[in-house]
Image (cartoon, rainbow, N blue to C red):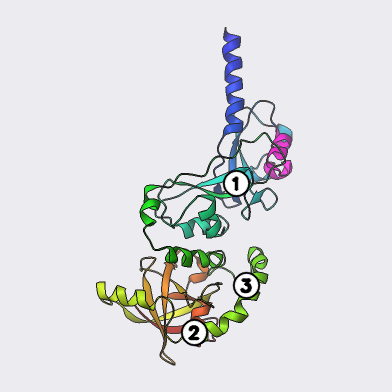
Amino acid sequence: MKKFILLTFVLALCSGVFAQEMIARHNERGMYVVHTVAPKENFYSLGRMYNVSPKEIAAFNNLTMEKGLSIGQTVNVPLTTQNFSQESATSHPVYYVVGEKEGLYRVSVRNNKVLMANLRKWNNLSADAISTGQKLIVGYLVSSDNSLAAAKPAPEKHEAVKAAEEKPAQKIQDETVVQRKEEERPLKAETSKETTTVPERKTEQPKATTAAVNDGNGGYFKTSFEAQVKSQPLRKDEMAAAGIFKTASGWQDAKYYALIDGVEPGTIVRVVNPNNNKAVYAKVLDKMTGIRQNQGYDIRISNAAATALDISDTEKFFVRVNY
């Protein structure tokens, strides 16, 4: 009877290992998932299972391969460009648990700047409203081993998401356009991931420059700004040290965006070039604190917005901000 109970426990442990949900975690070495060692598993079998070098797993955990692994031991398996895809869906989703006060943009930045358009698609999100504790697919494990669990269905829409669906469809489409930018926003301009999107951007920007310069009304969000002012009078009118972030949006549709602290995302701000009094209306995407490259700036505006304002300085300049 005791042998039977022991055998049942071991079988349950094995099945639990292969059914465990993969949750993305982070440390100073990068992204990883936690694996609980099952009977007969070792560095080599984990390497095959997760499509990563056994030596890399050992080094990531400060372990030596000679000592082996113990049943029930937890091992951090690194997510690398070899075994983790954030471009296309495969059969093994990796989830991220939304932290307190984290929006979809913060989830993107936290997880290798995965495109927000992909986050929406993989998680059936029709808007950017997410809630603390929600599990979101942030990529897929690329594995050569079939012993991993089959894909979990995409999470159901949370109540916050359903409520957000009342937003006009055009606004949702507008935010989808700018998602390519979220990957590259005011972090260093030319990372390896951005390099893969450069060819696509090159085909868009030649058309875009003229559209941004010739828009004489301040852009797509001017009407929204006027409606906003009617319901809530202007509270700020100040000079701000500004910088630029790159985006594919705004060149053809005159939809301009900004990053600024102390302003609720979704708010429309008026940005004026004091040298020529040209103005654009930009939607606030997120705050700036917490990102080292933003130090010394009060606001960042999209490159299309800077072009519309006839600003040529790509490092730092001053603008007047109203909201």
Q: Which mark is residue 57?
A: none
For the C terminus, the image quarter is: bottom left
Q: Eyeballing the image, is 110 above or below 180?
A: above
Q: Nearer the viewer, mark 1 or mark 2?
A: 2
Spot occupied by residue 115 in the image (x, y as percentages of width and height): 56, 60
Which residue is labeled 1 in the image?
32
Rendered residue at 47%/67% (across/down): 174
Under tag 1, what secondary structure?
A: strand
Q: Is residue 55 magenta?
A: yes
Rounded to the nearest angstrom, the CA distance separating label 1 from label 2 is 42 Å
Question: Reading the chain from its start, which is encountered first: label 1 or label 2?
Answer: 1
Relative placement, left or right, of 320 versus 6 is left
Whether pointer 1 and pointer 2 mark residues with C-beta atoms closer than 8 Å, the reply is no
Which residue is labeled 2 in the image?
308
Rounded to the nearest angstrom, the CA distance separating label 3 from label 2 is 18 Å
Which residue is labeled 3 in the image?
201
Under tag 3, what secondary structure?
A: helix
Mark 3, residues whose alpha carbon is within 10 Å: few (<14), some, or many (≥20)? Answer: some
Q: Amino acid at mark 1?
A: Tyr
Question: Reading the chain from its start, which is encountered first: label 3 or label 1?
Answer: 1
Q: Is residue 231 visible?
A: yes
Question: Reading the chain from its start, which is encountered first: label 3 or label 2?
Answer: 3
Spot occupied by residue 238 in the image (x, y as percentages of width and height): 34, 81
Look at the image and give the residue range highlighted in magenta. Answer: 42-58
Q: Amino acid at mark 2?
A: Ala
Q: Eyeballing the image, is 95 above or below 235?
A: above
Mark 1, residues whose alpha carbon is within 10 Å: few (<14), some, or many (≥20)? Answer: many
Spot occupied by residue 138 in the image (x, y as percentages of width and height): 55, 51
Spot occupied by residue 35 in the image (x, y as percentages of width and height): 60, 37
Relative placement, left or right, of 299 versus 108 is left
Q: Main secondary structure of the magenta part?
A: helix
